[in-house]
Amino acid sequence: MTTTPIAPPGAPAATGRDWRAPAAACTTVILWASAFVSIRSAGDAYSPGALALGRLLAGTVTLGAILLVRREGLPARAAWPGILASGLLWFGLYMVVLNWGEQQVDAGTAAMVVNIGPILIALLGARLLGEGLPRRLLVGMGVSFAGAAVVGLSMSEHGGSSVLGVVLCLVAAIAYAGGVVGQKPALRHGSALQITTFGCLTGTVACLPFTGVLVSEAAAAPASATLNMVYLGVFPTALAFTTWAYALSRTTAGRMGATTYAVPALVVLMSWLLLDEVPALLTVAGGLLCLAGVAVSRGRRRRGAPAGASRAPDGAGRQADS
């Protein structure tokens, strides 16, 4: 006689996968892709530090209002090391350095260099979080990185890059990876909204030295640039970082990092639809490679296959199934 295990309260129904985490990851990827289009407009009127501060201010106000409405309060003390790490590295340093780097190199070069971030996330997650390096993840990331390189090469303007710009994009990738790996443990001690809100607030405080520049540039900036900056704060920051944290709490940092390889493909599509930038065939091929790699890295182990390290439970004991 066998007994059917009883699922813990709040667990997804046994009849199918929980769709919320994959939906959250998709929301993040789409909004982060849209950010590249908005940054092109806002970046013409705002310097890197001012743009980062304005975006973070809009994000912090939005997140703070939602937090008050939901009455979630402060996260547990154990969450704060991860909040501070993600806030300083990802919300603060990453945004400023990436904005600066993209002014020094063309978009294609920036995309290639920054896309080492997911690889660093997987390596750091394996080393510091004990997540392991499943074969599907490694193969998928290799395919996606090759696609990102193809996209970058097809979009690069030869001779338009500088050593400083490449170094800045590399620093951005390292800060991004460090912020994600720092955020993952914090999600065991607070909700996605709490961790994102106070991470964004930390980044805002770190960028306050750019206040004077932001005020002076906002006075001269066209309304379209300022609206794009606000959009970046409300959607690609407040909403997308929260959905990211929600999905990250339900899977490994490596697999979530691999998901972002869909961004270059979506940027190509959005630039085509919104900016009338018709992509070359090589660019389209690279975008398809990115998506293929994401599909491989996010694929589920076949039933009856050896357990191995293809999936690892997250900190809360749930299987990484998003």
Image: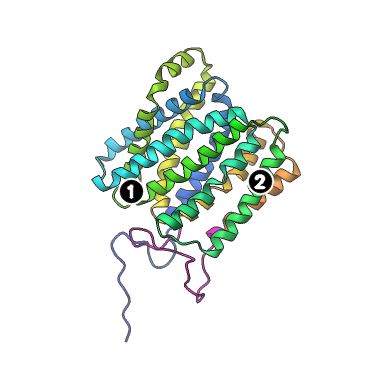
Q: Residue at x 31, y 59 (%)?
A: 10
Q: Amino acid at mark 1?
A: Ala
- How far is mark 2 from mark 1, CA to CA? 32 Å
Answer left or right for 265 relative to 122: right
Q: Nearer the viewer, residue 272 or 51?
A: 51
> In the picture shown, does residue 9 fall above or below 83?
below
Pick out the residue farthest to the right: 281
Question: Which of disc 1 and disc 2 is earlier in sequence?
Answer: 2
Q: Residue at x 54, y 59 (%)?
A: 137
Marking on residue 47: none
Q: Looking at the rendering, which quadrant does residue 136 occupy?
A: bottom right
Q: Residue at x 31, y 42 (%)?
A: 194
- Secondary structure mostly seen in the magenta stretch: loop
Crowding at dot 2, Cα within 10 Å, few <14 / some 14-19 / many 20+, comes out as: many
Image quarter in which the N terminus is found = bottom left
Q: Position of residue 190 (x, y in %)?
A: 29, 47
Q: Amino acid at mark 2?
A: Ala
Q: Position of residue 91 (x, y in %)?
A: 42, 36
Q: Which residue is mark 1?
A: 186
Q: Is residue 67 magenta?
A: no
Q: Is residue 162 visible?
A: yes
Is there CB contact under 8 Å for labels 2 and 1? Answer: no
Q: Nearer the viewer, residue 300 or 203?
A: 203
Mark 1 residue element: helix
Q: Which residue is mark 2?
A: 149
Q: Position of residue 256 (x, y in %)?
A: 48, 52
Instruction: Give the magenta part as a residue range.
Output: 296-322
Q: Position of residue 274 (x, y in %)?
A: 63, 33
